[in-house]
Amino acid sequence: MKYSSYVRMTPSRVVLNEKMLTFEDSGKNLLLEIYRKAVGDWPKFFKMDPLSKVGFVSTELLLSTESPRVKDCEDRAVILFNRSGSLADDRIYEGTIRSREEFYPSPAVFVYTLPNILTGEIAIRNKYYGETSFSVLEKFDASVMLRTLEAAFVDPMTRSAVFGWVECGSEEEFDVCLFLVHREGEGMKELDEKEFERIWKI
Amino acid sequence: MKRAVKISDNVISPLGTSTVENLDAILRGESALRVHSGSEKDIPEDFCASLIDEESLSGEYLNAGIPLEEYTPFERRLILSISKALSGTGIDPSSRRVLFVISSTKANVELLHSENPSGKEYPGYSAVKVASFFGNGNAPLTVSNACISGLSAQITAVRELECGHFDTAIVAGADIQSRFIISGFQSFKALSPNPCRPFDSSRDGLNPGEAAATVIYTWKEPQEGEWYAERGAVRNDANHISGPSRTGEGSYRALKAVMDDPEELAMVNVHGTATVYNDEMESIALSRAGLSAVPVNGYKGYYGHTMGAAGIMETALSMASLDKGVIVGMKGYSECGVSCALNISNENRPASGKAFIKLLSGFGGCNAAMLFRKKGGAL
Amino acid sequence: MEDLKQELKEKIIAALKLADMTPSDIDNEAPLFGDGLGLDSIDALELMLLLEKNYGIRLQNPAEGKKVFVNIDTMAAYVAENRTR
């Protein structure tokens, strides 16, 4: 598998293609700062749950390197993994139904209690009609993710993918390692287990 | 030519603990849907659902050697369904050449209601426990793609076999209808207070359902009479995170990606949740894909929406019914309530053809279709 | 009534997370859905929750909501007439 870009993001650090990006804030405010500086025109961001916010801004950074930015296509997939699924939002939703007295289940919170809503948000933003998929693993495992990615490319329609790990415990705790991968990519770097691990450790 | 051949399957629901028991029950027209008092789940509104009585499975758990105290109901049901599917197949589930793929939308989420879920709320934790029960050491995948999970799990599994990563894939799905899920769907005004009426003009929402289901695939040359997965596809509407596309975009594209000749299809087994927008969307997608004349059926009128189990149990029931040469009637349907007319009947009818498509769609704008074929002549 | 309209605007901005908006950005007669604030089906459900939580008004279904959530004027009139708290 080849890749053209990667983004590595934690609450205190953002690396895009070997370049450390400088932001003033961290955690929740880092997400907001990235949105303001790198996106700005997608107010749905404010409605998103923690996982979607984290995955959305990091994908925006990843795709900002693509020129021209590919939109409105069926041959790009979104294949993501993490450990917590949508637990960050599940806990928020549980808070809206915790007691019988204060029982006000929120539809806007409930809708995000599925991790694949993030893959949908990315598809909507970019008009990607291709495959979207979210899988949960017990822990970060580059080899399993790459194996599953290879399997995803069995679909002959799929030629590239936003791929990787988007772990999110809350807006203050997240760990992202995403790639823009391609079935064929002349002059592009090979994404193997070793390379995935190297970038994960950045 | 080698294919992902279906070796075995199992369905556990309130109507039975094997695929055959379930098929016989729905062929008789039985439904597992009942009206329940909200107080059963500590929620204000009553609801109509298909719920498994956990007590009724205790004998089965004992027989399968599942220690109750070590597993949550979600995990137990998965293990029981897998055990039953494995029985008599000769497959060694502990082999390094066997992959476990779990399909669930909410796994053990109900544990969040307790003070200290102690890590059991993580879906990957449950998947490892289930695989470990069978002595399997490969990292299991938990596919979490909302309502299409049961198909995307099968699609992933079949591709892993095609790539030669494994010889056998055990795909199992389950969900527990907790206070969490039911209150959420109520907040979405997506539930019908009565047994649901898929594709009917009076449909007014879905019913939550509980089931556990398993399907096992092995990469081999299909023998006469064996079912195999031809291919599957997942496509996104790229339109809205909860509302189905008004043009059926993703479902239409998924159908186009898996379809060969509509003439060979015995039926399309749809999602048919009985929400106003889902069924309308499916009718548009099927019509756009040129499938208006192909018999269409669905099982939500018998079981409600069993979430992570749905795609797997509906695949297993479709194979079993077509083996009998029957298309199960769409319970709850009486008058067409979608804008594109389809070939639907609420009565069991004879099937002809040696293939079918299973269709699902879900939140996140995702849609999945899978084409299954039976080796040999007519059904 | 003007106070109620102001209160509704503040609550809508908070509940629907309309960041970067202030009550003065919302016109009393401007449509809430469609071209106006660009709200969607989830927002409509969230507005129903807002009425229940703050004013003890339970709308049965989104269709009923459509008539109430035309604009701030219609919403305020409905709340004033039907509130139980």
Image: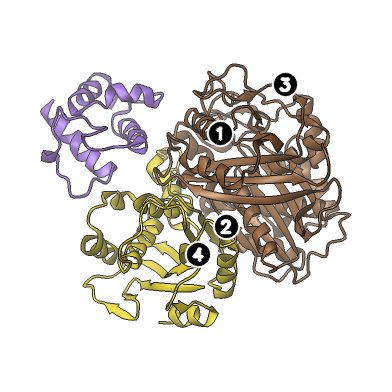
In the rendered structure, the residue with mark 2 lies on which chain?
A
Residue with the mark numbered 1: B286
Tell me which chain appears brown: B
- Tell me the distance, in whole angstroms, between the alpha carbons under discs 2 and 1: 21 Å
- Within 10 Å of disc 1 (Cα), the crowding (few <14, some 14-19, many 20+) is many
Q: Quadrant of residue A103?
A: top left
Callouts 1 and 4 on one subunit? no
In the rendered structure, the residue with mark 3 lies on which chain?
B
Rendered residue at 65%/32% (across/down): B298
- The picture places residue B168, in percent across and down from the top left corner, at 75, 62
- Observer-side mark, 2 or 4, equals 2
- Tell me the distance, in whole angstroms, between the alpha carbons under discs 1 and 4: 34 Å
Q: Return the residue nearer the eye: A149 or B224.
A: B224
Which quadrant is the N terminus of chain B positioned in?
bottom right
Tell me which chain appears purple: C
Tell me which chain appears yellow: A
- Tell me the distance, in whole angstroms, between the alpha carbons under discs 2 and 3: 36 Å
Display colour scheme: by chain
- Tell me the distance, in whole angstroms, between the alpha carbons under discs 4 and 3: 44 Å
Residue with the mark numbered 3: B347
Q: Secondary structure at mark 2?
A: loop
Q: Earlier in the sequence, mark 2 or mark 4?
A: 4
Callouts 2 and 4 on one subunit? yes
- Within 10 Å of disc 2 (Cα), the crowding (few <14, some 14-19, many 20+) is many
Residue with the mark numbered 4: A82
Callouts 3 and 1 on one subunit? yes
Residue kind at label 4, given as amino acid type:
Asn
Residue kind at label 3, given as amino acid type:
Glu
- Within 10 Å of disc 3 (Cα), the crowding (few <14, some 14-19, many 20+) is some
- The picture places residue A45, in percent across and down from the top left corner, at 30, 53
Q: Secondary structure at mark 4?
A: strand
